[in-house]
Image: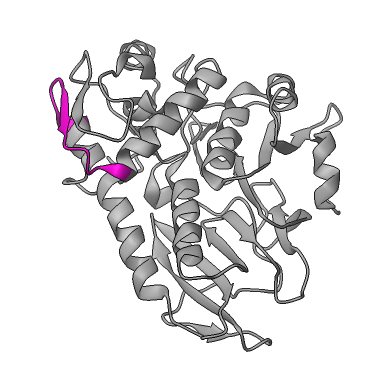
Amino acid sequence: MIKNSYPYLLAILATILGLFGCQPSAGPSHSAQSSYLKIRGETMGTYYQITYRDSLERDLQPGIDSLLLAINEEVSTYIDSSVISRFNQSVDGLQLTGTERHFIINLMKSREVHALSEGAFDPTVMPLVNYWGFGYTGKNPVTGVDSLEVGRLLRLVGLSRITGVDSLGPGRLRKPDPGMQLDFSAIAKGYGVDQVGAYLESHGVKDYLVDIGGEALARGLSPRGAAWRIGINLPSEDAGLTDLYSSVEIRDKALATSGNYRNLYESNGVKFSHTINPFTGFPERRYLLSASIVADDCMTADALATTCMVLGLERSRELIEGLSGVDAYLIFSAEDGSMAVWASTGMAAYSPTR
C-alpha cells in the first residue's frame, strides 16, 4: 500500500509550470515580482521547491531546513536513530516521552485514514516494502517470488494491532510481534509540506507554494496574481517529469498524486510497482494509472492518493464521493488502451485542462 521509502520518492505530481528549474540550489532567488522569492533544496530523498511573497525579502531557508531535518529525525526509516527506526528495531514497542510530535501526528493520521479506507491504507506494510525491493534495505529486485514468505510477512500487517499511544503525550507504543514495522513514506511528504506552510505563516507569509517531491500546498496568490497552476504528469513509464497530462489551478488547497508508472522494475518479464497492497502482500497493478487528490491539507491528500491506488477506480470513486472537502482526478486505462479520466464534481472548481 505504501509509497516506497525516501530514496525512491519521485515527483509523480508534476513540474510546477513556469515557476521552477529542475535542479536544487541553495539560497533564495527573486522572481519577476521582486517580493516573491524562490528557494530549493533536498529532503526525504527528493527535492523541495518553495515560492513565497515576503515584502521584507527574508531568507527563510535555514529555518525550513532545520524543520525538515527535525521531521526526518523522527519519521525517516533511513536514519537508524530516528523514532520510527527505533520502534521498528524494538522487540515489543517503544516508550515515547511525548516530545515525538512529528512521529505521533503521522501515526494518528495514519490510523484515521486506515479506518476511513477500511485497511487499504496501512503503514505496517514496511516488511513487505523491503521484501519487494522498495524499502530501506535497498532496491533489490525480486527474481523469484516466494509466496510462503509473502504470506509470512503479510501476517505482520495490521495497524490496529499497534496500540498504546493515541494522543500527543507520553506513553508506550506497543506491537505484538517483533517483526512489525512502520513506514510513513505515503504520508510524511504531505506532512512535511503542511509543516513548512505553517512555518511560513508563522512568519507572516500569506502567499506561497510549497512543493516536496511533487506534493504541494498553495496559499494566497501566485506571482501571476491568480491561483497557483500545477501540472499533473502523464502517467506513462516512458514519460519524462515535464511531460504533463493536465494542469489544475488551486488556491488555499493541497494537491498530491500517486501512481505506479515510474518507480517500478521488471524481473523475469514481470513488472513490480512500489505500491504494496496490504490485503494481498503483492505490488498493486490495477488499471488505475494515477490518483491526484485535492484536500485542505497535504497530509490528507498524500495518504488518500496512495489509498486510491490500492482501491482501484471504482472503490476510489465511492470513497471520494463520500468525503467532504476532498476531490479527485483519476487517470485510468480504458478498455481500448487509451487514457481516460474520472474527476469528482468539485474538481471543476480547479479548472483541470488538457
Q: Residue at x 38, y 25 (%)?
A: 125
Q: Quadrant of residue 88 in the image?
A: top left
Could you tell me how many numbered marks the image carries?
0
Pick whichever, 30 or 108, lies toward us: 108
Residue 7, above or below 220: above
Pick whichever, 336 or 230, lies toward us: 230
Q: Quadrant of residue 20 in the image?
A: bottom right
Magenta highlight on residue 147:
no
On the question of residue 149 being in view, the answer is yes
Residue 164 in the figure: left or right of residue 312: left
Residue 66 in the figure: left or right of residue 96: right
Pick whichever, 148 or 119, lies toward us: 119
Magenta highlight on residue 91:
yes
Name the image colouring.
one colour
Residue 238, above or below 15: above
- Give coordinates of residue 262: x percent, y percent: 57, 46
- Give coordinates of residue 332: x percent, y percent: 75, 34
Q: Residue at x 12, y 22 (%)?
A: 91
Q: Residue at x 69, y 36 (%)?
A: 326
Residue 225, above or below 233: below
- Give coordinates of residue 257: x percent, y percent: 62, 45
Q: Quadrant of the C terminus?
A: bottom right
Pick whichever, 324 or 331, lies toward us: 324
On the question of residue 338 being in view, the answer is no
Question: Which region shows up in magenta?
Answer: 88-101
- Give coordinates of residue 34: x percent, y percent: 63, 89
